[in-house]
């Protein structure tokens, strides 16, 4: 079933034509949702691990919240790992090894 959900996202409009970012995002998210469902059908739960090393950054916190919401909407598990800056690479390695 994998691969049948391919969508031609022709992102090169004729010169001077306005491109709707929202339309492009909707197309991409449709493909993501299909792939998530394909993975779930074979017993795999897609997961995004976000590593936050700067909790004092309001923009970073807003980005994390929005990403978590988008993951939830698309059926992707979201896990936030909060670490001090000096521990980021260790957290990345640990998240990469987590199955």
Image (tube, helix red, strand yellow):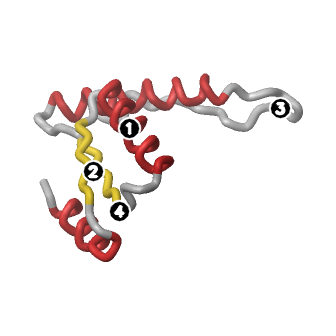
In this view, the mark in front (4 or 3)? 4
Q: Look at the picture and state if 88 lies above or below 65.
A: below
Task: Kindly state the secondary structure of the residue where label 2 is placed.
Answer: strand
The residue where tag 3 is placed is 14
Which is more N-terminal, label 1 or label 3? 3
Residue 13 shown left or right of residue 10 in the figure:
right
Residue drawn at point x = 18 percent, y = 31 percent: 40
The residue where tag 4 is placed is 53
Residue 77 shown left or right of residue 8 in the figure:
left
Instruction: For marks 3 and 1, give the CA distance.
Output: 36 Å
Tell which residue pokes out farthest to the front in this image: 56
The residue where tag 2 is placed is 49
Task: Kindly state the secondary structure of the residue where label 4 is placed.
Answer: loop
Residue drawn at point x = 16 percent, y = 28 percent: 41
Residue drawn at point x = 26 percent, y = 57 percent: 82
Task: Kindly state the secondary structure of the residue where label 3 is placed.
Answer: loop
The residue where tag 1 is placed is 65
Residue drawn at point x = 29 percent, y = 46 percent: 48
**Which quadrant of the structure image shows residue 43?**
top left
Q: Residues within 10 Å of mark 1 (few under 14, many from 20)?
A: few
Does the CB distance between marks 1 and 2 fall below 8 Å?
Answer: no
């Amino acid at each position: 079933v994998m691969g049948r959900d391919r969508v031609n996202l022709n992102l090169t409009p004729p010169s001077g034509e306005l491109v709707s970012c929202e339309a492009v995002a909707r197309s991409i998210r449709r493909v993501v949702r299909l792939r998530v469902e394909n993975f779930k059908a074979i017993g795999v739960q897609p997961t995004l691990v976000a590593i936050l090393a700067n909790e004092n950054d309001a923009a970073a916190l807003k980005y994390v919240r929005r990403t978590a919401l988008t993951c939830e909407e698309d059926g992707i598990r979201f896990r936030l790992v909060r670490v001090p800056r000096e521990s980021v690479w260790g957290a990345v390695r640990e998240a990469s090894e987590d199955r």
